[in-house]
Structure formats: structure tokens, C-alpha cells
């Protein structure tokens, strides 16, 4: 009996010892698992996902790096005029289309006895430094006709600047200051590589608010908005306002890929920038000659419509159709003929007539280029020696027409109407005015809308050309012009 009791006590003690040991081991394992590092092959859920280096978590570091090379530009220009009650109300930045709403001829006729006076007009813009010794890119309309240009750096230092070169066709200007130290500069990128949907950053001087930073994405590329013959804008929803003009549009790599230039009237989230490659192409001319020499082919071209493609038995609408070849010019000397379809230049595909004009304009005088074309259905290659473009330029025949009064007009597309905030597409828009022409003499300017020619209403370019072909239009024109919110008559004479 005593032996059984002894065995029972031994078993109980053994069991208790086992339970205590198990408990201690369990506690140790729990503590070890709490402090042990996670094995590398174990996937752990996290609230923070891996970040694409091109997707901004914050712009702060990028902005700190870029801001020193962005400048504010203020200009003063002297305007001599009478107390014109219809003068432009604009008081912010300059504009490539800013003049009086009523021409001098009209004003002198009704208010000629009012004495002339001079007054100073101030405007604001932006720019960015491209060389350590003070070369700066900005918009032409920011510095055009300025008597004094003042550049303010990010550290508050101010320098007077002079214009080195400017190009009204692309609205690009190069100015120069004389710094006492080496300046920070931007890094110039490649706008051809820019993709729709990429993040971009704008830094500028909107409404005089210095060093303002806005961000958005690239909304579209290659926009044609009727601002000039070389429209090729980057569209962005980064906020751009008056005063941003001339400022840089940056990629997430911190490179300038555009020059902020234009906004849509009455629009939100729609701004436009000049591709920086366009500025790079003309920089040597601006720096050495003060103006831009552009290539000249000597043709009038048009887009290929669906009907034209069918009639010419073309499989697609790609290329630029030659409508006219000017005798004695490069295309004529190379054997190009009306009806030819230009499909490639130096191996690069030509999509349409507008792209052809841009490509030719980027060549230098004396360049020899290889043009691939279709004559009938037979491919051909010709070599052309590029000449210098004068006021003639290449013409997109389907869309524009220069008359003897020195104007180029364009049908008002939905994009142009939206850009200008036009409630109606009636009339034609002036896209270019030859310097010294009758149209220039009376103050006609790009973005004017012509509503009537000699009292006849104009609905399209076809109507406009019809009226100009009449006998009475050969010597005199009475135009009803809309500019901004104002409408007025001007008289032109040959």
C-alpha cells in the first residue's frame, strides 16, 4: 500500500514538472518570436506600397533644387497715345496680341483733337536661366517693345536685362543680365520624349506672386490653337495664369521640357507650353543673329482628306499633298510637282501638312535634305537644298490663305474657339500679319476675328476668299473686326 502511494506521488511530481517545463518553453518561444527579425522570404502587408520614382510623394525637394534658376521679369514700355476711351484694359503681363481695341485711324477720326501724351505701362512675366553667365529664356510677348527689363532672382537680387534675340513666330525671346557671380542654371530636357499623363511642375510669377509652384500632368501634345504658324503646344492642367508666361515647365527629372505661354480664356486646367526642343533649335540664331532664319521649301501643301485619298487611290491619309510649287524655289528646282505626296523627310514620317511646315522650318539655310514622296503610287526620293524663309513661308493651302493686304486667315476650329473663349465660330481668324502691309498699317493683328468684308457677312474662309475676289475688293476693304469683347470697322487700301 505504501509502495502504491509512493508511485502515485512520483507520477504526480513528474507530471507537474513536465507541465512547468512546457509552460516555460512556451513562454520563451513567444518572447523569441516577438523580437526575432522577419525572415527575408516572408511577405508582410504594409500600408506603404513601393513608390515609382517618377510618381511624386512630395515636390518639396525638387522645388528646392529648381527654384534658384527661375526668375521674375518686370518690364516698362512707353506708350504714346491720346486719352482713347476704348483703350485696352489689360494691366498685367504683356501679350503678343495686346494693342488698343480701336485702331488709331478710328480714334483719330473721332477724337483727333485730343492731345497726344506718353505714359509708362508695366507688365510682368517669368523666365529661367540657361547659362551661368546670365542668358535667360522667356516669351517674346513678355519683353516685346520694352524700354526697360528688370530681372529678379530667387534671392531677391535685381539686374537690368537686354534683349539678345527674339522670335515672334514662336513667341520665344533670349535676354541677358550681367551677374557678379556664377548663376544657377536649369537642365534642358527633351520634349520629344514627353508622354501624355506624365507629371509636370510649373514655377513662375502669376499675378506678381513670386516663385509660385503648381503641379499637374501633360494633358496633350502637339496642340494647334491658332496662335501662330508654328503651333505645337504641350497642354497641361498645371495652373498657369497671367505672369507665368516665359516660365519653365519641369519634368519629374527636374529638366525643363516646356516654356509656359498661353491659357484658354474662361477655361480651367487648360494651359499651354512651347516644347523646349523648339527653343533649343532656335537658340544659336537668337544668340548670334538676334533673329531666326528658317528653312524654305517653296510649296503650298494641304492635308489629305478621306475623299482625296479615295480619288488618288491612297491606302491612308498620311502625308502632305503638294498643291502648288513656286517656280525657281528649292522644291521646283528639285523636280517636285503639284499632286506629289510628301511622306518622309530624312527618314522621318510626315503625318500631315502642319507637321511638314514645322519640320522644314527647323532646317537651316543650306541644309541638303532627302524627301520621300509618292507620285501616283510610285515612291520617289529627291534631294532638296533648303533656302531661307522670308515673309512668304510655306503655306498650308487647305487652312490658310494670304491675301494682297498682308493677312493670313484661318477657319475657326472648335479648339481655337475654346482657346479664345468665342461663343460663335462665325468669321475667320487672323493668324499672321506681314510687317509693313496694309493690314499691319491699320493695326490688324493675330487673333482678330473678321466678321464682315465690305458689309458682307463672313461665316468661313470660303466666304472671305469669295468677297476678296470681287472687283471692288481689289483696291479697298472695309472690315468688321472683333477683338476681345469689342467690335469695330477698319478700312484698308492697296
Image (cartoon, rainbow, N blue to C red):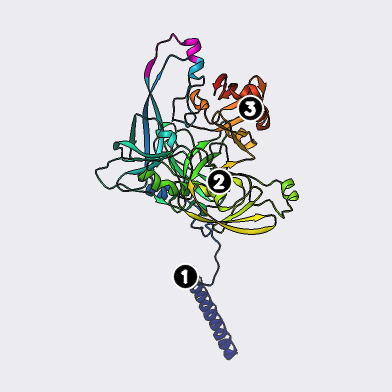
Q: Mark 1 highlights which residue? A: 37
Q: Earlier in the sequence, mark 3 or mark 1?
A: 1
Q: Are marks 3 and 2 in contact (CB under 8 Å)?
A: no
Residue 334 location (% of width, % of height): 56, 53
Left or right: residue 282 compared with residue 347:
left
Check disc 1 and report its element: helix, strand or loop.
loop
The CA distance from mark 3 to mark 2 is: 26 Å
Left or right: residue 139 compared with residue 159:
right
So how many labels did they put on this image? 3
Q: Residue at x 40, y 46 (%)?
A: 285
Q: Residue at x 53, y 51 (%)?
A: 198
Left or right: residue 213 compared with residue 147:
right
Q: Mark 2 highlights which residue? A: 357
On the question of residue 443 being in view, the answer is yes
Above or below 462: residue 393 = below
Above or below 110: residue 79 = below
Q: Nearer the viewer, mark 2 or mark 1?
A: 2
The CA distance from mark 3 to mark 1 is: 85 Å
Q: Residue at x 74, y 53 (%)?
A: 313
Residue extending farthest top? 113
Left or right: residue 481 compared with residue 108:
right
Q: Mark 3 highlights which residue? A: 468
The CA distance from mark 2 to mark 1 is: 65 Å
Q: Earlier in the sequence, mark 3 or mark 2?
A: 2
Q: Residues within 10 Å of mark 2 (few under 14, many from 20)?
A: many
Tell me, for residue 370, which label it has, or none. Answer: none
On the question of residue 212 being in view, the answer is no
Q: Nearer the viewer, mark 3 or mark 2?
A: 3
Residue 110 or residue 421, whichever sits in front: 110
Residue 278 location (% of width, % of height): 47, 47
Report the magenta residues as a range.
107-118
Residue 443 location (% of width, % of height): 50, 24
Amino acid at each position: 500500500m505504501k509502495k502504491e502511494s509512493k508511485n502515485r506521488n512520483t507520477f504526480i511530481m513528474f507530471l507537474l514538472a513536465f507541465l512547468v517545463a512546457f509552460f516555460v518553453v512556451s513562454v520563451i518561444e513567444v518572447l523569441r518570436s516577438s523580437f526575432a527579425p522577419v525572415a527575408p522570404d516572408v511577405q508582410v502587408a504594409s500600408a506603404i506600397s513601393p513608390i515609382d520614382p517618377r510618381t511624386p510623394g512630395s515636390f518639396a525637394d525638387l522645388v528646392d533644387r529648381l527654384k534658384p534658376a527661375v526668375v521674375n521679369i518686370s518690364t516698362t514700355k512707353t506708350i504714346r497715345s491720346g486719352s482713347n476711351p476704348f483703350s485696352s484694359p489689360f494691366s498685367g503681363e504683356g501679350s503678343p496680341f495686346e494693342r488698343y481695341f480701336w485702331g488709331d485711324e478710328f480714334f483719330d477720326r473721332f477724337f483727333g483733337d485730343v492731345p497726344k501724351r506718353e505714359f509708362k505701362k508695366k507688365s510682368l512675366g517669368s523666365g529661367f536661366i540657361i547659362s551661368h553667365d546670365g542668358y535667360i529664356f522667356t516669351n517674346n510677348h513678355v519683353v516685346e517693345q520694352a524700354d526697360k527689363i528688370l530681372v529678379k532672382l530667387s534671392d531677391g537680387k535685381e539686374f537690368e536685362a537686354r534683349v539678345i534675340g527674339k522670335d515672334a513666330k514662336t513667341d520665344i525671346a533670349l535676354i541677358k543680365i550681367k551677374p557678379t557671380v556664377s548663376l544657377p542654371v536649369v537642365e534642358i530636357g527633351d520634349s520629344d520624349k514627353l508622354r501624355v499623363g506624365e507629371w509636370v511642375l510649373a514655377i513662375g510669377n502669376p499675378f506678381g506672386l513670386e516663385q509660385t509652384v503648381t503641379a499637374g500632368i501633360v494633358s496633350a501634345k502637339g496642340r494647334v490653337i491658332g496662335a501662330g504658324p508654328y503651333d505645337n503646344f504641350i497642354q497641361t492642367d498645371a495652373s498657369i495664369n497671367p505672369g507665368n508666361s516665359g516660365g519653365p515647365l519641369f519634368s519629374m527629372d527636374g529638366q525643363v521640357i516646356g516654356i509656359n505661354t498661353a491659357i484658354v480664356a474662361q477655361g480651367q486646367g487648360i494651359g499651354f507650353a512651347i516644347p523646349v526642343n523648339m527653343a533649343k533649335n532656335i537658340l544659336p540664331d537668337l544668340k548670334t543673329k538676334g533673329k531666326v532664319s528658317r528653312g524654305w521649301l517653296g510649296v503650298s501643301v494641304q492635308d489629305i482628306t478621306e475623299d482625296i485619298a479615295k480619288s488618288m487611290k491612297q491606302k491612308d491619309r498620311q502625308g502632305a499633298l503638294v498643291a502648288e510649287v513656286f517656280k525657281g524655289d528649292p522644291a521646283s528646282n528639285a523636280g517636285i510637282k503639284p499632286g506629289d505626296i510628301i511622306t518622309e523627310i530624312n527618314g522621318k514620317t510626315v503625318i500631315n501638312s502642319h507637321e511638314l511646315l514645322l519640320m522644314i522650318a527647323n532646317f537651316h539655310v543650306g541644309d541638303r535634305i532627302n524627301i520621300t514622296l509618292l507620285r501616283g503610287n510610285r515612291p520617289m526620293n529627291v534631294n532638296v537644298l533648303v533656302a531661307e524663309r522670308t515673309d512668304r513661308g510655306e503655306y498650308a493651302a487647305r487652312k490658310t490663305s494670304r491675301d494682297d493686304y498682308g493677312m493670313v486667315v484661318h477657319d475657326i476650329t472648335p479648339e481655337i474657339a475654346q482657346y479664345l473663349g468665342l461663343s460663335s465660330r462665325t468669321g475667320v481668324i487672323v493668324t499672321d500679319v506681314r510687317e509693313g502691309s496694309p493690314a499691319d498699317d491699320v493695326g490688324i493683328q493675330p487673333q482678330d476675328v473678321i466678321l464682315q468684308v465690305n458689309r458682307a457677312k463672313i461665316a468661313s474662309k470660303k466666304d472671305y476668299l469669295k468677297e476678296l475676289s470681287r472687283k471692288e475688293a481689289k483696291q479697298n476693304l472695309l472690315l468688321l473686326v472683333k477683338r476681345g469683347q469689342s467690335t469695330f470697322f477698319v478700312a484698308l487700301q492697296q
